Structures are given as structure tokens and as C-alpha cells.
Image (cartoon, grey):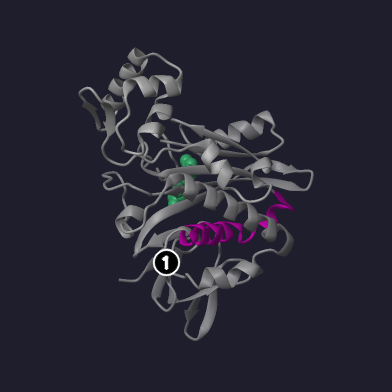
Amino acid sequence: MKLNSLLSILADQEVHSGESLARELGVSRTAIWKQVRKAMSEGYAIETIRGQGYRLSGRVDLLDRQVILRQLEGNLASQIELEILGETDSTNAEVARRLARGQSRIPVILADCQTAGRGRRGRNWSSPKGQNLYLSLGLPIKGDFTSLDGLSLVLGVAAAEALESIGKASIKLKWPNDLFAEGRKCSGILVEIQGELQQGYVQVIAGIGINVHMQQADEVDQPWTSLDLAWPEITWIRNSLAAAIIEAILKSVSTFEKEGFEPFREHWQARDLFKGKTVAAREGQLKGVGSGVDSQGNYLLEVDGSQVAVRAGDISLRVKP
Ligand code: BTN
């Protein structure tokens, strides 16, 4: 019996007798008691009510493969190979390993925690257990490397729209694809390319991290927030978030392969965090007013009346203090 099976039953926060739990999970009452102890040692608040059974106080938000698959529209579930891991180094690394083995469906990995979560520009990505979403997809993109222009922005738009479809939240995008909630970063996307061009496809690994329930993090070196902190009135459920994001990404990538970045440009610009702000790029060498993105997804700065494109890739933009 897996601990998550027990926790999923207790998640309704009602009292469940040891006997009914044992029956439902097909194990002995002693096995239930052992799992309850284990759950408590992992920090779950489970009360033992004499003569009645067990009750979980406090909300748990467990990842569940079947729940996610059921929420996917149409035939999307049959296109992916979804795996949920308790712990891994990095879900991007996991997808890379699946791709190296060869897999016909799109590998999609979710983990409850990461021990070596990676961010852009060599940063770490804080990945505590059970609180956030760590999700990676192995996406075969039709075309060559130049066809990838704008893809990372498309993924940002897809993720923003997915979050907005769940709650009445309004997400801003910091170029190229950081998601901001109430002025602070709540999510980041890491796009990596695996191997060489193969039979007209580029193998892209898209990893997204979303701070969902996180309330504190000592090791994050930039202003951050979580969905719970930004919008506590919304009940954020990781399974629903994962399903919405997987669906939005698969649909957007399919449009992107046919039509490129153009159909997404307005959607990106509507959420531009830097729009109208004075911004510095190229390590302070270039200063201008944020003016959206061009057709390749480069950021545009208005400098002395003309527009200067900041290449997509590795240049970071900062609002000038
Ligand atoms: C950023 O620096 O903003 C990008 C962060 C990307 C983090 C996600 S979490 C899931 C996936 N696995 C990783 O190791 N990184 C990405």
C-alpha cells in the first residue's frame, strides 16, 4: 500500500475507521496504523480519535496520475506517457533519460520534489516536497533549430493562460517567459534541447516550475511568491494545474508548429510586465522603454525614438531603479 493511497482517502478530512481503511485498501489494520505513523513522521497532521478512527486535519494536495489524465481534453491523454515521481533530481533530466531510451509517446514527468531542480542561467530551482508543481514535457518540434524562435515565449503564454483559466488570476510575463503574480515571480520555464536534429524534428524539453502552496523559501535569491500567497481566495489544486498546463502546452505547440509565433504575439504583449517601463539590458549598456516583442520573440526597447531588439536567449532585462 502506498502512503498516497491512504492520504487520498483521508484528504476529505472526515473520520475514517481503521477497519474501513483496511478494507478499502486491502491491507490489515496494523498496516494502516504503520502508514498513519509514517504519514505523521512526514509532517501530516493526523488525529487518532479513540474508538472512531483517523482524521487528517489540514489540507493535502496530492498528485494523482488518473485524476490528471481524466481532466485532459479529447485524445490528449493518449498522446502522452505521464509519470508521477515522489522524488527526482530534476524532471527535465528525467525526461532527457526517457527520450534517450526512446519512447513513442510524449514523455511528461511530474515530481513531488526535486533534489537538483535547475533554473535558467545555471540557477537552482527551489523544489520542496509536496508544495509546488515541477513538470517537464519532451516535445518533438517539427522543423530545424531556427523554427524554435519564440517557442519559449509561447510556453509562457500557454502557462499563463492555463493558470488564468483556473482562478480569477491575472498573470504578467517577464521576458522571455517568467510568470509573475501580483508583481513577483511565481513560475519559471526552462527550455532545453536534446541531441541533434532528427528526421525533421528538434527534441525540446520544456520544464515548468510553479510555486503553488509554498509559504517560505530561504534559498531563493529573487523576489518570489506562490499562487496561494498571491491569491489565497482561490483553491489551487496541483492536479488541476498540471492538467491545464499540459493541455495548454500541447495545444499551443501544435499551433506553433503550423503558424509560428505570430498568433501568440498579442497574447504575450497583453501580459508584458515591462510595457512602458524604463528597462536596462545588456548589463546596463542599453536603456529604453519596454515596447513588447517582435515577430521572432525578441524584446523591443524604444531608445531615442527607434526600436531596438534585444535578442531572445540569454540577455536579462531589469527595470531601471
Ligand atoms: C527559471 O529559472 O525561471 C526556470 C525554472 C524552471 C524550473 C522547472 S521545475 C521543473 C523543471 N525541472 C527542472 O529542473 N527545472 C524545471
**Residue found at x 26% / y 44%:** 218
Q: Where 171 sits versus 246, above or below? A: below
Q: Where 159 sits versus 207, above or below? A: below
**Does the magenta-highlighted stretch encompass residue 96?**
no
Q: Give the extent of the magenta segment.
A: 141-165
Q: Residue furthest bottom?
A: 305
How far across and how far down the image is residue 297, in percent? 58, 66
Q: Is residue 35 visible?
A: no
**Residue found at x 68% / y 41%:** 78
Query: Which residue does the numbered mark 1 point to in the structure image?
Result: 170
Q: Quadrant of the N terminus?
A: top left
**Residue found at x 50% / y 38%:** 110
The quarter of the picture where residue 264 lies is bottom right
Q: Where 235 sits versus 299, above or below? A: above
Q: Main secondary structure of the magenta part?
A: helix
Report the number of numbered marks. 1
How far across and how far down the image is residue 215, in percent? 27, 48
**Does the magenta-highlighted stretch encompass residue 145?**
yes
Which secondary structure, mark 1? loop
